[in-house]
């Protein structure tokens, strides 16, 4: 009995490991390919373990004839992600606090609007959102790239509302009796106490912004504003892909994805809490 | 003694004359609330509410965006839509893409979550193998999968593996039958991690003791899934489905635009890709706005169906 239990346990671990390797196989293949020579990548049957490690593929992705990634796109991706998420965080934690703790008419209406907006992804309002941004004269500028994304405050506001609502009311009553106004409460109470919610929010939003493709594609056609997903899309579509060596392309994908994998591994618990928390309501 | 009593909020509240402060407090909240939520609501209004209402208006007009103002044409765009065979094909393609993607995602993610819902040394590493693809963009995975799907006599890894089993691999992205399923495979692969995380969170709330007790009672794995696991996680299923729906909706543009451009012979032309084409390539902004309304209706329709399905499943 004990032995069979231990054996089934071992089998379970083995199955979990094997399926896990299958699930991450495309990533591992990309990583392996980014270190291979281009001749090894084109051998039949396909190789999965590099004969020798060609780290030179990584600098090659940044320069010379094989250049895939412009440093400018990297900087643009950082500006876009930090700008959109940073601004959105300020809007969301403030908005979430207001609808969680303050009493005023139309609170229910605003909360409902945020909730409805979750089901209207930017993709469905792409045309009119572009028209508005275009008419504001900010297409092909950083504000045009950042503001419409920062304005998607529905998810974040509801996430912070949920968390702040559950903070003990006594804290706020006590602060008020000490003469603190709402602004002070936001800075001294809400922002420090809602740190776990902020972590969950940042984990999800940073990934979303860094990986966003459609909006940058239409709002930043000018090459000076291109972000990394646009760079990858260019090598992903056949024409360019035939010219650049495959190993350098793989290295480029690793370079673009690695920051997010590191972010993800660092914040995985927060990420899981944030996602799971949104389902518990 | 009096100090401790006063700091107790219950008693402290008893000491304040409630009838007088209440209305004043309400007033004060309102003013502060308005000031503090203003930036959020202003942005929300300009970039979400105005586009939603403006999009509805645009759908009754014809406009090339650059010149003058939208011209009112009533229902013309909608009439044109009904007679446009490409629209029906795009709707069908989109629905297929979403349905063939969502159903496997929900089922597989529950299975994966059950696989990694137990404890041993190194489980966090194994879990990371399952969850890391969540960090990848559609664009990045499109690049990698393009090489995995590569056609020709055993060129891509996938074709090589399939032919080892003695099966002739399909042409994937170049085939009218297999291009859409190929895009679905990529989108499923990208959607699984988040769906798995959600189910895993639900599974971890089922106490070990319940499962142990069922084992002692001699319940087999199937009965355990049916009577303990499923009732424990089914509340999460609507959220998994909605998150998957939004992910496949986004994928229906990103993957199509990068990998197939709607080809071969329009077989992967999704509604959003058609909208993108009509507006940014052809300058038919009014028509594209009408098609966007169709896209919203489609998502709303899927949500209604999900709601019906989940109410049926919940009774089960």
Image (spheres, coloured by chain):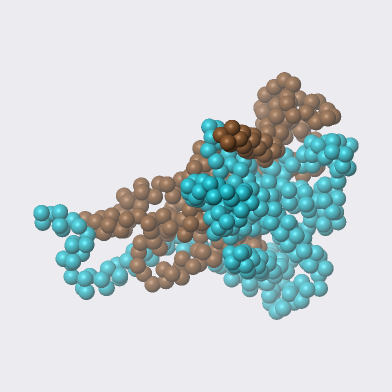
Residue B26 position by quadrant: bottom left
Q: Is A173 left, or right, of B4 in this rendering? A: right
From the top left corner, tell me how far across and down residue A40 is, in percent. 79, 26
Q: Is residue A67 visible?
A: no
In depth, the one of B46 and B275 nearer the eye is B275
User: Quick one: which chain is cyan?
Assistant: B
Q: Is A171 left, or right, of A13 in this rendering? A: left
Q: Is residue B179 visible?
A: yes
Which residue is at 71% across, 59% downward? B99
Drawing shade for chain A: brown
Instruction: Identify the image quadrant of the N terminus of chain A.
Output: top right
From the top left corner, tell me how far across and down residue B83 is, in percent. 81, 73
Q: Is B150 left, or right, of A216 in this rendering? A: right
Which residue is at 56% across, 67% downward? B50
From the top left corner, tell me how far across and down residue A225 is, in percent. 62, 45
**Looking at the image, which residue sits at the far bottom?**
B74
Q: Is A195 left, or right, of A88 in this rendering? A: left
In depth, the one of B313 and A98 nearer the eye is B313
């Amino acid at each position: 009995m004990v032995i069979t239990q231990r054996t089934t346990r071992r089998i379970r671990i083995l199955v979990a490991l094997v399926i896990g390797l299958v699930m991450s196989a495309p990533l591992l293949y990309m990583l392996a390919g980014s270190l291979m020579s281009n001749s090894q990548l084109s051998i039949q049957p396909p190789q999965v373990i590099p004969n020798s490690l060609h780290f030179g593929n990584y600098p090659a992705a940044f320069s010379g004839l094989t250049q895939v990634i412009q440093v400018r796109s990297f900087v643009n991706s950082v500006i876009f992600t930090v700008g959109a998420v940073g601004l959105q965080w300020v809007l969301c934690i403030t908005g979430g606090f207001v609808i969680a703790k303050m009493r005023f008419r139309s609170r229910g209406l605003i909360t409902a609007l945020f909730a409805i907006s979750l089901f209207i992804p930017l993709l469905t309002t792409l045309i009119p959102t572009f028209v508005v941004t275009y008419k504001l004269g900010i297409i092909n500028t950083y504000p045009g790239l950042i503001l419409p994304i920062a304005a998607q405050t529905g998810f974040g506001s509801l996430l912070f509302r949920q968390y702040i609502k559950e903070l003990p009311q006594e804290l706020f009553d006590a602060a008020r009796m000490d003469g603190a106004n709402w602004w002070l409460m936001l800075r001294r109470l809400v922002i420090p106490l809602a740190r776990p919610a902020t972590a969950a929010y940042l984990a999800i939003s940073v990934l979303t912004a860094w990986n966003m493709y459609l909006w940058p594609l239409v709002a930043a056609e000018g090459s000076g504003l291109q972000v990394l997903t646009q760079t990858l899309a260019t090598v992903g579509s056949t024409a360019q892909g035939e010219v650049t060596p495959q190993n350098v392309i793989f290295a480029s994908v690793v370079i673009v994805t690695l920051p997010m994998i590191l972010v993800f591994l660092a914040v995985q618990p927060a990420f899981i809490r944030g996602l799971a928390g949104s389902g518990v309501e | 003694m009096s100090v401790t009593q006063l700091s107790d909020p219950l008693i402290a509240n008893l000491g304040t004359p409630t009838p007088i402060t209440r209305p004043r407090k309400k007033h004060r909240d309102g003013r502060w609330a308005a000031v503090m939520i203003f930036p959020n609501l202003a942005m929300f209004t300009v970039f979400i509410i105005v586009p939603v209402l403006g999009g509805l208006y645009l759908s009754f007009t014809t406009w090339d965006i650059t010149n003058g103002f939208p011209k009112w044409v009533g229902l013309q765009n909608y009439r044109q839509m009904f007679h446009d065979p490409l629209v029906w094909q795009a709707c069908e393609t989109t629905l297929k893409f979403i349905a063939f993607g969502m159903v496997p995602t929900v089922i597989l993610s529950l299975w994966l979550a059950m696989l990694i819902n137990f404890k041993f040394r190194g489980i966090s590493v194994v879990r990371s193998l399952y969850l890391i693809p969540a960090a990848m963009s559609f664009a990045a995975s499109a690049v990698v999968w393009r090489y995995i799907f590569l056609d020709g006599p055993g060129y891509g890894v996938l074709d090589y593996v399939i032919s080892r089993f003695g099966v002739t691999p399909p042409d994937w992205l170049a085939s009218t039958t297999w291009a859409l399923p190929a895009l679905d495979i990529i989108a499923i692969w990208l959607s699984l991690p988040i769906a798995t995380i959600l189910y895993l969170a639900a599974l971890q709330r089922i106490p070990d003791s319940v499962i142990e007790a069922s084992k002692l009672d001699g319940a087999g794995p199937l009965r355990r899934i049916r009577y303990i696991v499923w009732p424990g996680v089914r509340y999460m299923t609507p959220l998994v489905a909605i998150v998957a729906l939004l992910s496949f909706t986004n994928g229906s543009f990103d993957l199509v635009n990068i990998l197939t451009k709607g080809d071969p012979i329009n077989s992967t032309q999704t509604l959003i890709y058609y909208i993108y084409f009509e507006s940014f390539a052809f300058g038919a902004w009014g028509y594209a706005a009408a098609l966007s309304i169709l896209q919203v209706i489609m998502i709303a329709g899927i949500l209604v169906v999900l709601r019906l399905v989940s109410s049926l499943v919940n009774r089960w």
